[in-house]
């Protein structure tokens, strides 16, 4: 593949060719090829320097495997399009998901959305590792916004760490539950429940009574959590992504949340950037350390030799780390 010109690609994002350009742009920031890294960094810099004029909204959606996230996003997404939004979805590709989502039907279960000109769906290939959010997800959100999408949804499978990741990169976090998923708050881990700005029990069509019970249980769980500093009351709604019941209400509620947030959106976005920076620094450090360990610095024989010399792993690790840090000094 020939090297990409980031400036030309960025210009294409704002042209009628933006859809194809967005696909290429996200592929570029997801690329781990050393040759792509500089171009990706330049593209991200361009997007950061030229933020969209129209305010944007970033919504994270999570829930245990099979809870109905994709079906819900399809229903909510169509509702958002009716309300005049342009919607981008960073979705999980179920064929690569640990959830073992059905392989029947559309790849992402968003068949109708896929056909909408005002919607863009990008299946993420890395659901297995981090619940669908990878290192490039933040950049992908930025690029969607640069391409004119004012509503960006990030879908993730609830695997513990993924919820924190998505919460840290979005303006609102919606957690989906389902009826009769057993004890302990529908399988939602405590701590995760408290991250949610919105809670919805899906599949109310199939098990209406159980859905109401599940909602009541979640409300009790929320009661135990400390009150939020922003004063927002987290409600637990029930809905059916399949029949569409409760979907307009969910969109209303999100819209209200968005209006409220306008006042403090700058602070929330600033927090997101700080987190992004931290992640970037950590990732870069690990990458360099791996290069060091793989290369001359401490090859396998060398490491084995160190172990013989120092006997314990912690002692050997300490020495190697100190040497690595010294080697990084200018
Ligand atoms: N009865 C009923 N079934 C639903 C509803 N929403 C989703 N489903 C079904 O639940 C199954 C899983 O739906 P998905 O939308 O793929 O769930 P998901 O959470 O995205 O799954 P993963 O991405 O694989 O974790 C599918 O068979 C859907 O048709 C609903 O509201 N009611
Ligand atoms: Mg899904």
Image (cartoon, rainbow, N blue to C red):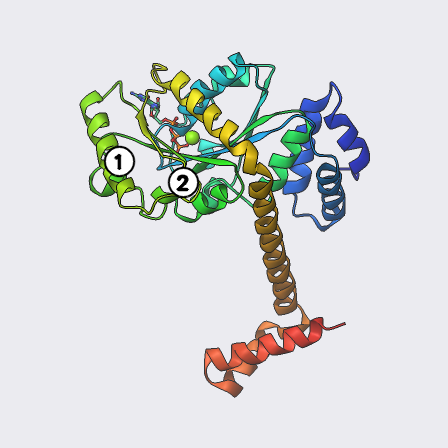
Taking the spot 45% from the left edge, 42% from the top edge, the residue there is 131
> Which residue bears the numbered disc 1?
219
Callout 1: CB less than 8 Å from ligand 1: no
Q: In the rendering, at what x and y percent does residue 87 appear?
A: 56, 23
Which image quadrant: the C terminus? Answer: bottom right
Q: Which mark is residue 98?
A: 2
- Crowd tier of the residue under label 2, counting other residues whose Cα lies within 10 Å: few below 14, some 14–19, many 20 or above: some
Left or right, 271 with reference to 1:
left
Which is in the foreground here, disc 1 or disc 2? Answer: 1
Q: Residue at x 59, y 61 (%)?
A: 286
Relative image position of residue 273 (x, y in whole percent): 61, 46
Identify the element where label 1 is drawn: helix
Query: Within the image, what quadrant is residue 223 found in?
Result: top left
User: Camera-side residue: 183 or 218?
Assistant: 218
Q: Secondary structure at mark 2?
A: loop
**Location of residue 324 (image quadrant):** bottom right
- Alpha-carbon span between mark 1 and mark 2: 29 Å
Q: Nearer the viewer, residue 96 or 138?
A: 138
Q: Residue furthest top?
A: 82
Q: What residue is rendered at 60% in x and 49% in y?
A: 276
């Amino acid at each position: 593949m020939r090297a990409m010109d980031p400036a030309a690609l960025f210009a294409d994002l704002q042209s009628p060719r933006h859809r194809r350009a967005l696909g290429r742009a996200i592929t570029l920031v997801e690329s781990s090829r050393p040759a792509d890294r500089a171009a990706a960094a330049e593209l991200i810099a361009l997007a950061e320097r030229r933020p969209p004029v129209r305010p944007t909204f970033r919504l994270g959606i999570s829930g245990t495997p099979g809870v109905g996230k994709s079906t819900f996003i399809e229903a909510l997404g169509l509702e958002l399009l009716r309300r005049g939004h342009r919607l981008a979805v960073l979705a999980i590709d179920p064929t690569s998901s640990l959830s073992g989502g059905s392989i029947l039907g559309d790849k992402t279960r968003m068949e109708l959305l896929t056909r909408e000109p005002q919607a863009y769906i990008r299946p993420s290939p890395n659901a297995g590792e981090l619940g669908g959010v990878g290192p490039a997800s933040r950049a992908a959100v930025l690029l969607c916004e640069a391409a004119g999408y004012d509503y960006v949804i990030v879908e993730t499978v609830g695997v513990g760490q993924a919820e924190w990741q998505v919460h840290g990169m979005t303006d609102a976090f919606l957690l989906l539950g389902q009826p009769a998923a057993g004890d302990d708050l529908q399988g939602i881990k405590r701590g995760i429940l408290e991250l949610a700005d919105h809670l919805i029990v899906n599949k109310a069509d199939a098990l209406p009574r159980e859905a109401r019970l599940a909602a009541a249980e979640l409300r009790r769980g929320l009661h135990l959590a400390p009150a939020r500093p922003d004063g927002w009351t987290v409600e637990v709604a029930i809905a059916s992504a399949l029949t569409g019941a409760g979907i307009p209400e969910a969109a209303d509620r999100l819209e209200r949340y968005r209006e409220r947030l306008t006042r403090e959106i700058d602070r929330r976005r600033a927090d997101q950037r700080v987190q992004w920076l931290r992640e970037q620094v950590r990732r870069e450090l690990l990458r360099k350390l791996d290069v060091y360990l793989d290369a001359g610095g401490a090859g396998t024989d060398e490491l084995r030799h160190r172990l013989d010399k120092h006997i314990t792993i912690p002692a050997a690790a300490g020495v190697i780390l100190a040497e690595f840090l010294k080697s990084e000094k200018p």
